[in-house]
Amino acid sequence: MDFSYTKQMSIGNRIIDSAHEKILDLINRIEYLIKECDCHALSETFNLLEEHLSDYFLVEEGIAQAINFPFTEHDVAHQYLLNKVQQSKNDLVANNGMWSNTTAKHYSNLLRDCLSTHIKVESEPIKIMLGTRFYDFKPS
């Protein structure tokens, strides 16, 4: 099932929203590769997701600093999300494409739930602060 980015998921900043949409696309790709049991492509896509998350976290931290948003708690949420992605990758790759439908569904749901929680719950405070800025706001 495709997990699509919707307007309701917007944080109110083009840079962050674009990053969230790209992360969602990568999670959808991972879900497809899990179903296909394509371990090699799955590992590569997880690596892309980890790189994208790391880059996105730095950008979001810069935006947070520019608007004087206290970032420590949000940074902990970022590390939790990255750890879940790395743990999922390690678990799936260790099984070398040999996993049950239940396992596949578990990891697909886990990744979706982690990102959904990050966007809808953990990012709500920064969304509120960004509400006073232009959608195209960038830190100087």
Image: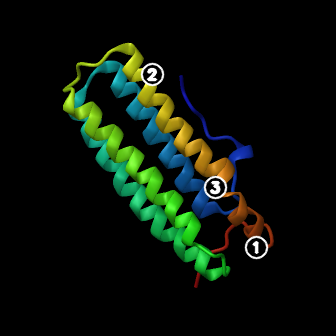
Earlier along the polypeptide chain: callout 1 or callout 3?
3
Q: Which residue is mark 1?
A: 133
Tell me whether circle 1 and circle 3 mark residues in contact (CB < 8 Å): no
- Residue 96 vs 27, above or below: the answer is above
Question: Residue 46: where, in percent of width, then height?
Answer: 32, 43
- Residue 11 vs 109, above or below: the answer is below
Say few, some or many: other residues with alpha carbon within 10 Å of mark 1 (under 14 / 14 to 19 / 20 or more). few
Question: Residue 116: where, in percent of width, then height?
Answer: 60, 42
Residue at point 40%, 25% (across, down): 32
Earlier along the polypeptide chain: callout 3 or callout 2?
2
Say whether residue 44 is left or right of residue 114: left
Helix, strand or loop at disc 1?
A: loop
Q: Quadrant of residue 91?
A: top left
Disc assigned to residue 105: 2
Residue at point 36%, 20% (across, down): 35
Q: Quadrant of residue 73?
A: bottom right
Say whether residue 104 is left or right of residue 128: left
Q: CA distance from mark 1 to mark 3?
A: 19 Å
Which residue is situated farthest in the right direction here?
Answer: 132
Say whether residue 118 is left or right of residue 79: right
Say few, some or many: other residues with alpha carbon within 10 Å of mark 3 (under 14 / 14 to 19 / 20 or more). some
Q: Which residue is mark 3?
A: 122
